[in-house]
Amino acid sequence: MELNRRDFLKLSGIGTGAAVAFSLLPYTAAFAAPREFPLKRKVKETSTVCCYCSVGCGAIVTAYEDGIIKIEGDPDHPINEGALCPKGQAMAQIHQVNGEPNQYRLTKPLYRAPNAEDWEEKSWDWMIETIARRVKNTRDNNWNNSANRTDAIASLGGGELDNEECYLLTKMNRALGVVYLEHCARI
């Protein structure tokens, strides 16, 4: 079938007219309308500021009454413009629901003896005394009197620490004579 120019314009006009007429009909809106699902629980969005590195990135927290659904960067915030680092994206993990800790967050210390395969749950008192004793023994056995420091201990800060915790960790390590300090925030 060959179309000449006149037939092509006729068919184009008919097709355009049919599309416009179809879009004006009232029943066509029902085909394109999204289905509405009523929410069984109220969802609330709140703007907040990330608590970790004092940059002040903005975040939007979406939550039910009893827990966080998600945390995302605030696209209208002038500092991060919608982006969040891994620490900011993990803010939901520190949240408590109805006073109960997050089910995935450890709340009791675990200890694995040298060459052991399994972790065992220990008390906080035992864990603190064991760590303090080992730090003191290592420091005393490797103390450099001429430099007033020890090279046998290093400190690696974690990404979940906020500014205040990093400050206290640094002060404690300096008081112990530790010179090898490392942290993702480079304090």
Image (tube, grey):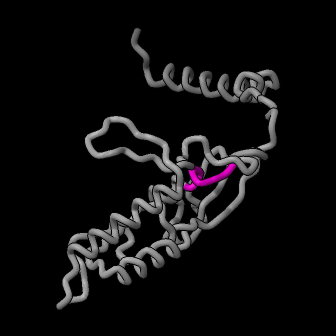
Kindly identify the residue that appears in the image at 67 percent across and 51 percent down: 96
Rendered position, 36 above or below 64: above
Name of the residue lying farthest toward the top: 1
Kindly identify the residue that appears in the image at 38 percent across and 83 percent down: 175
Say whether residue 1 is visible: yes
Kindly identify the residue that appears in the image at 48 percent across and 55 percent down: 126
Residue 147 locus on image (x, y percent): 20, 89
Q: Nearer the viewer, residue 118 or 137?
A: 137
The answer to whether residue 180 is left or right of residue 94 is: left
Q: Nearer the viewer, residue 123 or 183?
A: 123
Kindly identify the residue that appears in the image at 57 percent across and 65 percent down: 50
Magenta range: 91-96
Does the magenta stretch mainly form a helix, a strand or a loop?
A: helix
Q: Nearer the viewer, residue 48 or 183?
A: 183
Say whether residue 54 is visible: no
Rendered position, 25 above or below 148: above
Rendered-image quadrant of the N terminus: top left
The answer to whether residue 11 is left or right of residue 5 is: right
Q: Nearer the viewer, residue 19 or 1?
A: 19
Residue 55 locus on image (x, y percent): 50, 74
Which quarter of the picture shows residue 15? top right
Q: Is residue 94 magenta?
A: yes
The answer to whether residue 76 is left or right of residue 21 is: left
